[in-house]
Image (cartoon, helix red, strand yellow):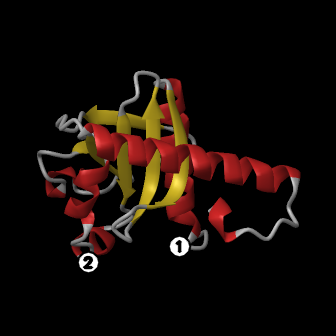
């Protein structure tokens, strides 16, 4: 069996692949203004912002009560879980994605709750700055700039 820490990374890869097929650009492990960290923040072609919270097990899900705090930073919120996860645990207002290391399927769309313009702008700017910083680090891995995420 693989290292349990690898499992969420595999789920993240599958989620990001599936979102890319749906026209989203994705970033993983994104710090939000409220101090929380989104597992995946995705930006759609139309400007839609989606957060996906990845839960690898029931214990992981039950121990996490911070997920409602993500709603203030996205238009839709999803949970991504492995195939064996009991899907009835996922709140109805949240989307449901079943994922593995190779892809994912959206089984239920999350309720749409469009962001206010000022919050949308702030999240979009954070997304752009973080993406640019990560790309820059690929070109210049020795850069030491904490602002690059």
46 is higher (above) or lower (below) than 146: above
135 vs 8, left or right, is: right
Mark 1 falls on what kind of element? loop
- Local packing at callout 1 (Cα closer than 10 Å; few below 14, some 14-19, many 20+) is few
Asked whether the residues under the numbered discs 2 and 1 touch, taking CB atoms below 8 Å apart as contact, a structural biologist would say no
133 vs 123, left or right, is: right
117 is higher (above) or lower (below) than 145: above
Residue 14 appears anywhere in the view: no
The residue located at (37%, 49%) in the rendering is: 52
Give the position of the C terminus as an image quadrant. bottom right
Q: Which mark is residue 63?
A: 2
- Local packing at callout 2 (Cα closer than 10 Å; few below 14, some 14-19, many 20+) is few
Residue 75 appears anywhere in the view: yes
The residue located at (50%, 62%) in the rendering is: 8
Q: Nearer the viewer, residue 16 or 98?
A: 16
Give the position of the N terminus as an image quadrant. bottom right
Image coordinates of residue 32 in percent, x first then y, are 41, 61
44 is higher (above) or lower (below) than 130: above
Q: Nearer the viewer, residue 105 or 25?
A: 25
Image coordinates of residue 70 in percent, x first then y, are 28, 57
Cα separation between marks 2 and 1: 17 Å
The residue located at (37%, 68%) in the rendering is: 36
Residue tagged 1? 4
The residue located at (36%, 62%) in the rendering is: 55
Mark 2 falls on what kind of element? loop
Q: Nearer the viewer, residue 28 or 63?
A: 28
Image coordinates of residue 5 in percent, x first then y, are 55, 72
Q: Residue furthest left?
A: 92
How many marks the image carries: the answer is 2
């Amino acid at each position: 069996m693989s290292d349990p820490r690898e499992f969420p990374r595999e789920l993240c890869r599958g989620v990001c692949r599936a979102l890319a097929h749906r026209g989203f650009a994705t970033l993983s492990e994104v710090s939000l203004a409220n101090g929380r960290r989104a597992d995946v923040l995705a930006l759609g072609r139309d400007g839609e912002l989606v957060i996906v919270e990845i839960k690898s097990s029931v214990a992981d899900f039950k121990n996490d009560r911070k997920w409602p705090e993500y709603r203030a930073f996205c238009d839709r919120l999803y949970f991504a879980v492995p195939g064996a996860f009991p899907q009835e645990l996922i709140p109805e207002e949240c989307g449901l994605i079943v994922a593995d290391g190779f892809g994912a399927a959206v089984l239920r769309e999350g309720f749409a709750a469009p962001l206010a313009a000022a919050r949308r702008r702030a999240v979009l700017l954070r997304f752009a700055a973080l993406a640019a910083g990560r790309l820059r680090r690929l070109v210049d891995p020795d850069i030491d700039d904490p602002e690059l995420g």
